[in-house]
Amino acid sequence: GGRETNQVSDDYRYQDGNYEGYSPNDGYYRGGDEPTHEEDAQSDVTEGHDEDDEVYEGEYQGIPHPDDIKAKQKKRAPAMDDDYRDRADLMAERMEDEEQLAHQYENIIEECGHGRFQWTLFFVLGLAVMADGVELFVVGFVLPSAEKDMCLSSSNKGMLGLIVYLGMMVGAVMLGGLADKLGRKKCLIISLAINAAFAFLSSFVQGYGFFLFCRLISGLGIGGSLPIVFAYFSEFLSREKRGEHLSWLCMFWMIGGIFASAMAWSIIPHYGWGFSMGTKYHFHSWRVFVLVCSLPCIASLVALKFMPESPRFLLEMGKHDEAWMILKQVHDTNMRAKGEPERVFTVSYIKTPKQVDEFIEIQSSTGTWYQRWLVRITTTFKQVWDNVLYCLTAQYRMNTLILAVVWFTMALSYYGLIVWFPDMIRYLQEEAYESRVKIFDEEEVSHFTFNFTLENQIHRNGEYRNDKFIGMKFKEVRFEDSLFEECYFEDVTSSETFFENCTIISTVFYNTDLYEHKFINCRLINSTFLKEKEGCHLDFEEDNDFLIYLVSFLGSLSVLPGNIISALLMDKIGRIKMIGGSMLISAVCCFFLFFGNSESAMIGWQCLFCGASIAAWNALDVITVELYPTDKRATAFGILNGLCKFGAILGNSIFASFVGITKVVPILLASSALVGGGLLALRLPETRDQVLM
């Protein structure tokens, strides 16, 4: 009779940091344990006797050998079992496979080393993070210019400021979820391509509606990049390097803020850096700035084409050979950079989890092309929705809820204060400006030609007869209870200028922007308006606020010490202590804002707050990546980052409404949110010692 041989398992098992089945010293595969002495003795006794050579008595009668029947049944068993097994059993088997893969993959990444490949990917993905940082600053910098170029009302300005966050919120959830199904690299390319295309287009469109739409879609694109970037990069890092290098990656957000501030400072004030086509199309310097701000995104998009897909994602999808080739590429790239090109990549087989997703595919001969695409899209979005629900299952529900609260409270206070600081500085400037106002009472002027600028003045009970106002500018000028008789206004430009309770008799207005709404409760008798100015007119050199650029530049630069400290200590003190400590210190910084009664004091406290809070942001990014498995990682990060942008929208709206009214509400709201979120974060599990599941 024949003997049933024991098959050697192809799976590696994680034991004491080594793979069972091969020795890392010589790189040769060992098919199991060494034979014992008893087996040696048995082989000596039976030497020369081969059981396989024995003849089965039914062989010549055409009867199959019983062992052959068993072997065929075993081959058919897995396929038959999967059809009848409960989905819960399949999921349990997949989770067991994922746990084995997690340990094996950690050792493979350690064998590949940390070197040239990771640093190249670091800079490529860093440009994408930089583009995200730039996107948040663009609208704030161009708003003072765009509001006059597009004739924006206060409500339109507010919508333009919030529309980017709205796009980011949708993009984070949507593209983050797709990255767990379609791949990190593919979805990141889509994300950056959307941002680059619509950011570029927004610099050329003239109307407010089209500009708003372009910034919305641009925000949607860049919003999806952040969840993908951190999931993507983490899957090329070993456990010892992950916390530190993900924190270094966050530094590119700071670089994006510095880049945007420097470009705004050097480009926007140069009004001549543009061109016009007729009277309708104007390309001013702020549009050049919008164009330049799309460069980091374009650079990252081009460089990403030369980077591979995440091998961990490919293994989750069951694509073993592709993942193995990429890991070998990582290994060989790093070894050549270290001067050890002769070192061989010893891994021959990697565990792949059992595939349980049900893919629906229509053959090309069935249905029309749009029906096939509709089925594919519907199936993909159903799988994304299942991933979203999975983050709320019993295993992850508590961690997801705690992280959601921490992300939200952090965003509410941080983004709210980031908008509140410039608004408060602007309010303090306006107060100082109004304190220098000049008041003229009961002045009488006749047969005089005004051809110069009037600024920050109030004229009460004045009388102006046969006067000419030619080629001049009114800035922050009010005429109250005054008389204008037989006067002539030509080529007049005004800003925040109004006529209240005035009587205007036999006066001509030619080519001015003194529109109807600027005359409040006035009597116009035999007065004529000819050829009113169209559009909005702005003297960029005067109206742009250089201090706002400086504030944003210093605020971005102030996070540098926090970035360095968090990167160096992330793996030493842990993610939880980093989040809690940073948020509590930031809350203390908020209380000192009560003493910020000058521009310099507000700038100083803003820098201190930004520097203290950046460590919490970095730790949140790291722990969110580490708490969720590979096939749910980008989805979970996208959900939480989308919630973060929702907190930013609320923070901007709430905090801005209290500017000039009171400082108590914004300060107490920000500090209490930071304290609550910081204390709640202490209930999260520490992840610095666990492998990436």
Image (tube, helix red, strand yellow):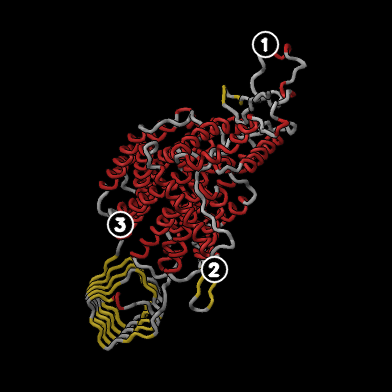
Horizontal relation, residue 481 to residue 655: left or right: left
Residue of label 3 = 431
| Disc marking residue 274 | 2
Reading the chain from its start, which is encountered first: label 1 or label 2? 1
Reading the chain from its start, which is encountered first: label 3 or label 1? 1
Q: Nearer the viewer, mark 3 or mark 1?
A: 1
Tell me where residue 582 appears, x and y as whole percent: 39, 36
Tell me where residue 28 appears, x and y as whole percent: 71, 26
In the image, residue 31 sits, relative to residue 460, either above or below, namely above
Inspect the image, locate mark 3, and give the three-letter code of the amino acid beneath it.
Glu
Q: Nearer the viewer, mark 1 or mark 2?
A: 1
Q: Measure how far apart labels 3 and 2 are at the Cα level.
A: 34 Å
Label 2 Cα crowd, 10 Å radius (few <14 / some 14-19 / many 20+): few
Residue of label 1 = 37
Horizontal relation, residue 191 to residue 148: left or right: right
Q: Nearer the viewer, mark 3 or mark 2?
A: 2
Label 1 Cα crowd, 10 Å radius (few <14 / some 14-19 / many 20+): few
Depth check: 485 or 613 in front? 613
> What residue is shown at x 75% (from left), y 24% (from top)?
53
Which residue sits furthest right? 48
Q: Measure how far apart labels 3 and 1 are at the Cα level.
A: 94 Å
Secondary-structure class at tag 2: loop
Q: Quadrant of residue 44?
A: top right
